[in-house]
Amino acid sequence: MGKSTVSQMIRDEGVPVFDADATVHELYTKGGRAVPMIANHFPDAIVDDAVERTRLSALVLNDHDAIRLLENIVHPLVHDEQRRFLEAAERTGAALVVFDIPLLYEGDRANEFDAVIVVSAPAAVQRERALARPGMSREKFEAILARQVPDQEKRRRADFVVSTGVSLEDTRVAVKKVMSELRRRAEQQAGNS
């Protein structure tokens, strides 16, 4: 959808962004906190004392029990890192932070946040971008889509929608507007405290 691009634009606006995908990547690297737990349940996914994401993906693809097990391992670790990120942001006086979290609605976590920004692109653009990623196949893409809340529903439920099916400059303008509104809300909320 262009989530990483939008996250970088938000960082460019001076707002700290917690990147759940990057956190998972760190948890999967050699010495990462998730490696021993994943090794216990998915030993074939471990290469050189790290989780090999392509292998892990192949092991859990279309296996709901395996996906649930993996989520039960990884999600608490990610939530712990989110808490640390938020505490660090509070210590630095950040008035606003953004959490870049895939599958937010699927995990029924939207109510944990003051506002939700959905990054969206037309289905054809989404498919083209996804299939261009290393290790992505049509089967994997379809399996991922099947687990997700449809884009139209996410857009309906969001507080803000940023389209990435337009030029980068148009997306940047939309991000600036959203950040301006969120800063206004944060200032208003701080004034009411």
Image (cartoon, rainbow, N blue to C red):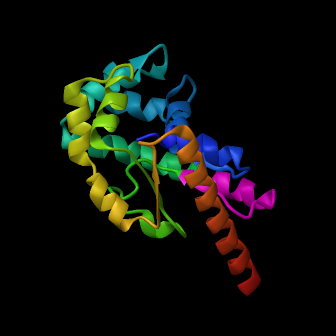
- In the image, taking residue 153 as reference, residue 28 lies left or right, namely right
Q: Position of residue 35 (x, y in %)?
A: 47, 29
Q: Give the farthest residue toward the top.
A: 48
Q: Is residue 96 above or below residue 121?
A: below
Q: Position of residue 75 (x, y in %)?
A: 44, 48
Q: Is residue 30 above or below residue 147?
A: above
Viewer-proximal residue among 46 and 83: 83
- In the image, taking residue 164 as reference, residue 154 lies left or right, namely left
Q: Position of residue 68 (x, y in %)?
A: 28, 46
Q: Give the farthest residue toward the bottom.
A: 192
Q: Position of residue 178 (x, y in %)?
A: 58, 60
Viewer-proximal residue among 31 and 176: 176
- Residue at image location 56% in from the left, 32% down from the top: 26
Evaluate whether residue 43 shows in this view: no
Q: Quadrant of residue 23?
A: top right
Look at the image and tell me in which quarter the N terminus lies: top left
- In the image, taking residue 73 as reference, residue 147 lies left or right, namely left
Look at the image and tell me in which quarter the C terminus lies: bottom right
Residue 124 within the segment the image draws in magenta:
no
Viewer-proximal residue among 119 and 111: 119
Q: Which residues are magenta?
A: 84-99
- Residue at image location 52% in from the left, 67% down from the top: 115
Q: Is residue 185 above or below residue 68?
A: below
